[in-house]
Amino acid sequence: MAYIFVAAAVLAVIPILVLFKVNMEKLKEDPGQRNKVQSHFMIGVAVSEVIPLILLVFGFMGTNQVDSMSELYIPGLIILLLMGFAAFFIFLQRKVDVNPETKDTINSFAAISAALVNAIPIVALVALFMMAP
């Protein structure tokens, strides 16, 4: 049952990173479109988090304590690695092909994206802690 939370985290992070990459490129080309790019990004994030939220609800409905803590090591490690990958990807993208005059816009977009991409994985980790004996 712990892997439903892993699936929710994966299905939340991957689409958000794709949306981030697409919108970051648009923002690098024309930083004047900041409001438009951010609104499209937020709409995309909201749509892409529907299935992970449903998975989280089903996971919380069927949450049982595990017999051994070792049953939660692999799911927890997968979620932590996914969060690390997402942070690495976002902060690497903000360093590539950035003009000095667009740096503030790019940095703020990256910070917002980092918070949004880690929301579902953090909830999934909390769910794993709730399953601990």
Image: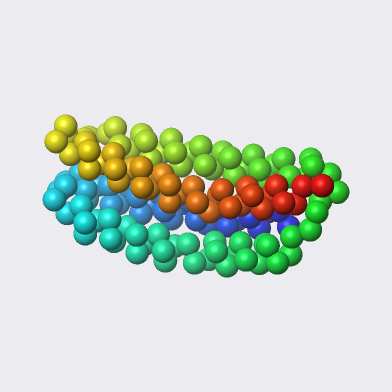
| Horizontal arrangement in the rendering, residue 15 relative to residue 93 (left or right) | right
Compared with 56, 86 (above or below) is above
- Percent from the top left, x then y, of residue 50? 49, 67
What residue sits 38% from the left and 48% below the top?
113
On the question of residue 10 being in view, the answer is: no
State the image coordinates of residue 33 (x, y, percent, origin top left): 17, 54
Q: Is residue 76 left or right of residue 31?
A: right
Residue sitting at x 38%, y 52%:
18
The extreme right residue here reads 67
> If the image is split into quadrants, where does the N terminus sit?
bottom right
Relative horizontal placement of residue 17, taking residue 127 as reference (left or right): left
Q: Could you tell me how many numbered marks the image carries?
A: 0
- Which residue is painted at 40% across and 49% down in the image? 17
Is residue 15 visible to the viewer in this orientation of the structure? Answer: yes
Residue 68 sits above or below residue 5 on the image: above
* Residue 71 in the figure: left or right of residue 43: right
Q: Is residue 74 above or below residue 39?
A: above
Residue at image location 66% in from the left, 53% down from the top: 127
- Along the line of sight, the residue nearer the viewer: 16 or 118: 118
Q: Position of residue 73 (x, y in %)?
A: 72, 40
